[in-house]
Image (cartoon, helix red, strand yellow):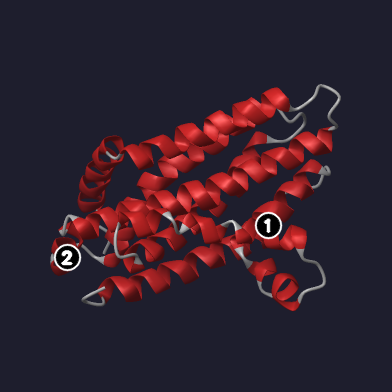
Amino acid sequence: MISTRKISAIYSKNIKSVLSNPFIAALPFMMVALAFIFHMITPEYATYYETASTLIMLVLMNVLIGGATIMAVLIAEEKEKNTLNVLITSTVSPLDFLISHVLTAATLTITVNAAMFYIMRVPDLPIVDYMIITSIGSIAAITLGATLGLLAKNQAAASTMGTPLIALVLLPSLITDNFIVDNILYYFFSEQINFAMVDLIRGGELDLLRIGIMAANFIAFALIFAVCYKKRGI
């Protein structure tokens, strides 16, 4: 059973941890500042597709480096303070723990996604569809970050885990006609965010199949997290 009381209590504790951790607190501001910089340096004659492509890149960076990394550092901090062991051995279930932490990281990541939408000002891009795509993708990335946080030895190790995730953004654009890119990364949430955003930019509608693939990513990552959470001595 899900306990809203426990989720609320852990969420409140996490928000305080975010505000007291300079690294986590700085990440959202850095992503918003980066959006402002790109908006300022984008020439007025830039095409609609060029501006939209920049927005997609920023969203992917925020989802992967911001969302996943924030989550990983949050949980690694729990390990360092030994509060994770207390929660594991208490009545807090893996689902309660995961939901509370996902809500914490999602609050930051989704807020930044919305801010970047208004900063970049891509005309005719429907905000409702944009928020649905980026929010579900963010939650999938954050859940992946939760497992990385459990596996990280400390906060420093967790903070560097965002670097390999950049490959999820760069590989598909740098490598074509590759089995891994075309058949494995295609079903990863980062690629589905990219394709779903491109569909919208080209005037298409929200593709429920892409939403389903991202939701499946979340479920898979959540199951992996639950297994790791229940193990002792992580």
As measured in the structure, the alpha-carbon distance from the residue carrying label 2 to the one carrying label 1 is 37 Å
Query: Residue 55, position in %: x, y?
Result: 68, 38
**In the displayed structure, would residue 233 be above or below residue 154?**
below
Q: In this view of the protein, which residue sits in the foreground, 106 or 180?
A: 180
Could you tell me which residue is drawn at 24 percent across and 65 percent down?
Answer: 93
Query: Residue 115, position in %: x, y?
Result: 55, 30
Q: Which mark is residue 117?
A: none
Question: Dot 1: few (<14), some (14–19), or many (≥20) neighbours within 10 Å?
Answer: few
Could you tell me which residue is drawn at 63 percent across and 27 percent down?
Answer: 37
What is the secondary structure assignment of the residue under circle 1? Answer: helix
Residue bearing the label numbered 1? 170
Disc with the residue nearer the chain's start (2 vs 1): 2
The answer to whether marks 2 and 1 mark residues whose Cβ atoms lie closer than 8 Å is: no
Residue bearing the label numbered 2? 85
Query: Residue 107, position in %: x, y?
Result: 42, 40
- Which quarter of the picture shows residue 230? bottom left
Q: Is residue 99 left or right of residue 204?
A: left
**In the displayed structure, would residue 148 be above or below residue 58?**
below
Q: Is residue 99 left or right of residue 197?
A: left
Q: Tell me the quadrant of the picture where the N terminus can be found.
A: bottom left
- Which quarter of the picture shows residue 168? bottom right
Q: Amino acid at mark 1?
A: Leu
**In the displayed structure, would residue 208 be above or below residue 54?**
below
What is the secondary structure assignment of the residue under circle 2? Answer: helix
Q: In this view of the protein, which residue sits in the foreground, 94 or 30?
A: 30
Q: In this view of the protein, which residue sits in the foreground, 100 or 120?
A: 120
Q: Is any part of residue 63 visible from this angle? A: yes
Q: Is residue 27 left or right of residue 170?
A: left
Q: Tell me the quadrant of the picture where the C terminus can be found.
A: bottom left
